[in-house]
Image (spheres, grey):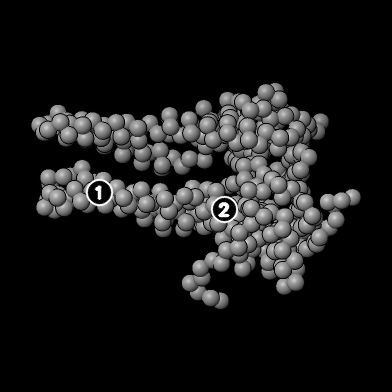
Amino acid sequence: MIGNSLVMSFESKLKIREYAEGYRLFDLRRGKSSGRVWKSSVFFAIGIAMMIIIMLNSWDITRVPVACVILLVCIYMCSYYLYMLPKRAKLRGEHIFKSSKLLSKNCKYYIYRDHFIMKSENETLKRYYTELTDCIETDDIFLLIGGFENRVTVISKRYITQSQRQLLSEHFQRETIRQYRRIKPKRKNKQ
Amino acid sequence: MEKEIRESYRITEKDFLQMSILRSRYLTPKENKIILRIVGIIATVGGAAAFINIRGNIYQTICWFLLIGVGLYVFSYYDVTDPFLTYKQAQAFYRYNSESFNSKTVIFTPTLFSINDDSHKLSVPPEYIHSAVEGKNTLIIFIDNEQYYFIPKRVLSEDKLSVIREIIGEEKYKKEV
């Protein structure tokens, strides 16, 4: 049948740091961290305005206590959106992985032309690419977001050969054109 | 006699909205609510005290009223604003994705929790259930801190609910008031 030819199949198993990284990226795209740059920009602008008000009052904070409080709140909110939220997202991903008995199980993936199937001991999931809101590739994982409540599917690259990775990457680029993104994550410590 | 519950149902918009509000309320940490209430009280009382005691120009008066307003907003955020936003988001999500809300079949036995629809099948022993919360209209079952399934209570009688409660276990089961 047209559209049902199997492109490839492979087995995979997730590690906690891979799921946490996937969840952090999901949160940046679709979760609380999404739009953090413009949100922090708004607070930054308000903070600058408060600083100007304080400056116009000769830096006498007793004359403009409300402006000082607002400035402190803006500084906190900027650091919250730029630094604290992404860190919390990664921690939350680790927390979710530890709370789940399913995420650490072996999964078999069947990649078809217009959909993929994930099968594990307890779960079978079929998702069409048209249902996906995002397909993100990094050096270590493929992250597929979509379906009911933007479900996160993280595929580890550890068990996939180099040629399979290339084939899978090209396949996702072709089938999820608008949703596909290639991200190179920042790494502080290279292993 | 073996206890088995098998139900098939379709999720309506009302079911999804009620579930979303319950889930949002259940997942919100109590500390967040307490912190916002404290901040709201401080802002409201501080603004009121400043308005009464500090004689200033019209701009300062406006600032104090704004502070009182912000304090009241922050105090009542999780009672008014958060449910409203959750309701609107859930409503938009359902209407945009209504075709993905397929009929589901749920099975509960002492050794199995299973939920199936056209695109997804899950079969786990009840020990895999992380927690469950029962609201006025919905029962939500969490497999972990993120993955959840919900059953509208309109398809479950009180007897079936008590069987489910027994299978999941009292320590994992919470009833929201």
Name above or below for residue A104 compared with residue B107. Answer: below
Of callouts 2 and 1, which one flags the residue occurring earlier in the amino acid sequence?
2
Residue in view at x 78 percent, y 57 percent: A111
Q: How far apart are marks 2 and 1 (CA)?
A: 33 Å
Q: Position of residue B79 (x, y in %)?
A: 43, 30
Which disc is residue B33 wearing? none
Residue in view at x 63 percent, y 67 percent: A140
Instruction: Answer with the quarter of the image where residue A15 lies.
Output: bottom right
Which residue position holds label 2?
A: A26
Q: Is mark 2 on a helix, strand or loop?
A: helix
Which residue position holds label 1?
A: A49
* Residue type highlighted by circle 2: Phe
* Residue type highlighted by circle 1: Ala
User: In the displayed structure, does residue B177 sit left or right of residue A50?
Assistant: right
User: In the displayed structure, does residue A125 sit left or right of residue B45?
Assistant: right
- Pointer 1 indicates a residue of which chain? A
Residue in view at x 51 percent, y 70 percent: A187
User: In the displayed structure, does residue A120 sit left or right of residue A152?
Assistant: right
Q: Where is residue A116 in the image (x, y as percent from the top left)?
A: 76, 53
Using the rendered image of the protein, determine whether residue B81 is visible from the camera's viewpoint: yes
